[in-house]
Amino acid sequence: PLAAAPVWADTVAPPAGEAMHQNANAKAPPMTEAEFTRGKQIYFERCAGCHGVLRKGATGKALTPDITLARGTEYLKTFIKYGSPAGMPNWGTSGEFNDQQVELMARYVQQEPPTPPEFGMQDMLATWKVQVPVDKRPRRKENQLDISNLFSVTLRDAGEIALIDGHSKQIVSVIKTGYAVHISRLSKSGRYLYVIGRDGKINLVDLWMAKPDSVAEIRIGLEARSVETSKYRGYDDKLAVAGAYWPPQYVIMDGASLKPLKIVGTRGMTVDNEYHPEPRVASIVASHYKPEFVVNAKETGKIMMVDYSDLANLKTTTIDAAKFLHDGGFDASGRYFMVAANASNKVAVVDTKLDKLAALVDVGKTPHPGRGANFTDPQYGPVWATSHLGDDSISLVGTDPEKHKAQAWKVVRTLKGQGGGSLFIKTHPQSANLWVDTVFNPDAKLSQSVAVFDIKHLDKGFSMLPIGEWSGLSDGAKRVLQPEFNKAGDEVWFSVWSAKDKQSAIVVVDDKTRKLKAVIKDPRLVTPTGKFNVYNTQHDIY
Ligand code: DHE
């Protein structure tokens, strides 16, 4: 899956006379400059997301030379090749790295990490393009699509999204986006789709066009993961915001053109009052109660309620939560935002009406909810649930402080799932099922199937559905991930994510009968991962 590199760049013994990397740490195994450059690229593509550009650790462990040198090349090779049940992917045995690349990376992480450059307003403006100006765009919807039931599907390694019609299951359009594209979000009206790549490139797609396409683009940093739009009354489709991993900053843009309006850096003190040079911006959601974005800084553990009503006099309420904030979603009422502080094994609950921390809840090991799942527990009332990367548990947290006060912000029930390595959990108001993936479990049987619980009979345990097998794909490692419902809430879609050069698929399951309904296969479906149903994403339904 990685771009082909000159063979010698990955070999242990480079040709004589190759320039060596000048490293500050004399104890690190030597590398040529070309190897270092190659390692830097692979690190950026595959490792920085979890371990940080400066390798200070977050979702993944710290990898600074003081730690990696003590581990040594052989130990690091084993870890990189085989992964760990705690969430480190098996880069070697999955076929993503060959042995030379594993060895290269084991040496690379013993070198001092290089610091990438900053990326400010002038850099952003230089990348900003409006392909179709606002006054040249359709005045009404020019296609026959039910855009509310479209799915925006991440084609990770193609750097594209596919728009798939939820009814016909046909691909409507494939749109070029940023590198290793990550998530899609919708504007308040549901007309505009915002897609962000790991390279910080945002594409704005107009779903009203005869054939939906990108109408504007910009890069907001060198590495990024999150994008969101203004949802408060009166700000429909007005503003967008994106969070960068590097440089650590968030950017507020004009919603219709992506013109950058305001950049705010996040470097500063952690909740423990220690300085952090790389507090990356993780998830961002838009408040329904105030003109505010809820911006989560991973390493500092601070949640910023950013008031977008007056960008020149920006008011921000900063909430101390817990370190390593990552992903999350609203409770069913839309008032409370539940965000995983993953390496702290906690979920922070923010009251977006009062702009206060409602609670810090201890959950299982390394919670990873995606946006989480909201449903009514037969015994304990409304709950929001998360699964975990680091263990096989599913934590159900009470979310109704009015009618179920004793249960509010407590883990009311812990379910046993089929294994660790889970990333996403999902249900729908119309569904009686709770779907849980185990995408990064090292056991192929588990990573290729999902667990489903009956919400009315949670104590009965789960059933395992062999989604990978149902896809009918034969060769190669295939990971099954991210349940996503259609608008009606009667179908649940799963990605079957194979390597870039292998066939992938989307498997659609009938939610009521739990039987296979359709398999979407198309040569254009390269490495599908996240799927975002327009209506459910627009309205925070999960
Ligand atoms: Fe994601 C959401 C970061 C790896 C698929 N991912 C998020 C969010 C963040 C994030 C901060 C929340 C965005 C928001 O709500 O505003 N993801 C990271 C990483 O740092 C990490 C761990 C490592 C990396 O190198 O990027 C990472 N993510 C992955 C993957 O490997 C996944 C499984 C496949 C892929 O496409 O890259 C993946 N992440 C997703 C998906 C969501 C997501 C599908 C949105 C879930 C949703 O339902 O909203």
Image (spheres, helix red, strand yellow):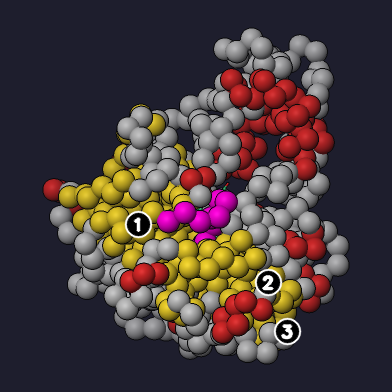
Callout count: 3
Q: Position of residue 148 (x, y in %)?
A: 45, 82
Label 3 to label 1: alpha-carbon separation? 40 Å
Dot 1: element: strand
How busy is the neighbourhood of tag 3: few (under 14 within 10 Å), some, or many (20 plus)?
some
Q: Nearer the viewer, mark 3 or mark 2?
A: 2
Tell me if residue 376 comes above or below residue 526 in the rendering: below
Tell me if residue 292 comes above or below residue 172 in the rendering: above
Dot 2: element: strand
Disc 2 residue type? Ala
Q: Mark 1 = which residue? A: 359
Residue sitting at x 36%, y 29%? 275
Disc 1 residue type? Ala
The label on residue 516 is 3
Earlier sequence position, callout 3 versus callout 1 = 1
Q: Residue 174 lies in magenta, yes or no?
A: no
The residues colored magenta run: 361-372
Q: Mark 2 = which residue? A: 451
